[in-house]
Image (tube, rainbow, N blue to C red):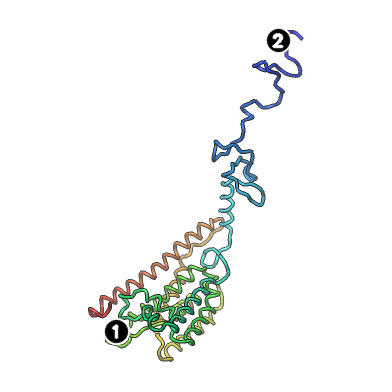
Amino acid sequence: MPHGQQSAYGQQSASGQGPLQPGLPSADAQAAPTCPRHPDQVSYVRCKRCGRPACGQCQRQAPVGMLCVDCERELAAAQAGSQPRNAAGGRMGTQTPIVTYVLIALCALAFGGQMLIGTAFEQPMLFAPIRALAMPWTFITSGFLHGGVMHLLLNMYALWAVGQFLERTLGHWRYAGIFLLSVIAGHVAVLLLASPADPSWITGTLGASGGVFGLFGAMFVTSRRLGGEARQIIVLIVLNIVITFTVPGISWQGHLGGLVMGTAAAFAMFALRPKATPGADRAALARRSALIHAAVLGAGLLLCIALVAVKALTVPTGSLY
């Protein structure tokens, strides 16, 4: 073959080390693939979704194969946005009424302490207007004490009957927040309507009834908002109010205080809940709803604190300690 003429089957390499095969990539094109997030890491494993290389740190096992960390996050966000929400706009969560079980268990344990230990257990937890400022925790703890077996059983039955539906509908922490806020509001009402010149000023108040009445009010609001039949809950509320005012020894102030607060809190939650529109990010709406509803409960607590402060300023000095 004449000098300088190329062969039909190959060409001489610049280094003279042999022919390069036609159609094969150059040395630069044959560079090993690297992870976009960690360029110093070589990886021949590619994401099944986007096709990019993923190093060991960025690989995520999925049912469809290996995904990179970015695709995993995008899929998780998309799935979270499509998850069903409860009536209050929060995540569905478990359908087991865990909070209701816990509240019933705490009341039962507290009653056991009352029976076994007596006044040494009960007195530090019992609410009385005269010592409301000195023992502020009693605004809550007194709601877990009860005056007898029947008192405990009636309240726990009502809590069980209403709590199962309401906790699944509103979600665990919203439901717990309404109950505890209603317990506090019931004792605030007792304080506001008591007088230092009256025996009620030094009388202890106990029981979960304030919280239960708050749940009654929340149940009414929830049923109406969901388009359900609210007649039965109205009859239940009216019947319990009649019993409250006809049976001696019942704190009607605590019942009404809890009822008003529970109703108002549930109404505000539904009224201020962000409305979902087609194509909206439902996960973002759920986070916004949670912030708004936490603010509703916080506003209710601040209102209770403000009312206690007003009462403290309007009674004779030394009446509250």
- Which residue corresponds to the image point at 61% horizontal and 38% vertical from the top-left? 43
Few, some or many residues within 10 Å of mark 2 (<14, 14–19, 20+): few
Give me the disc on residue 11. Answer: none
The N terminus, quarter of image: top right
Element marked by disc 2: loop
Residue that numbered label 1 is attached to: 195
In-front residue for pair 7/17: 17
Q: Measuring from the top left, give residue 254's x and y in whole percent.
A: 40, 81
Distance in Å between CA atoms under marks 1 and 2: 118 Å
Q: Quadrant of residue 282?
A: bottom right
The C terminus, quarter of image: bottom left
- Which residue corresponds to the image point at 41% horizontal and 65% vertical from the top-left? 295
Q: Quadrant of residue 307?
A: bottom left
Position of residue 192 in the picture relative to residue 34 (left or right): left
Residue 103 in view of the camera: yes
Looking at the rendered structure, the kind of residue marked 1 is Ser
- Which residue corresponds to the image point at 49% horizontal and 79% vertical from the top-left? 108
Residue 189 in view of the camera: no
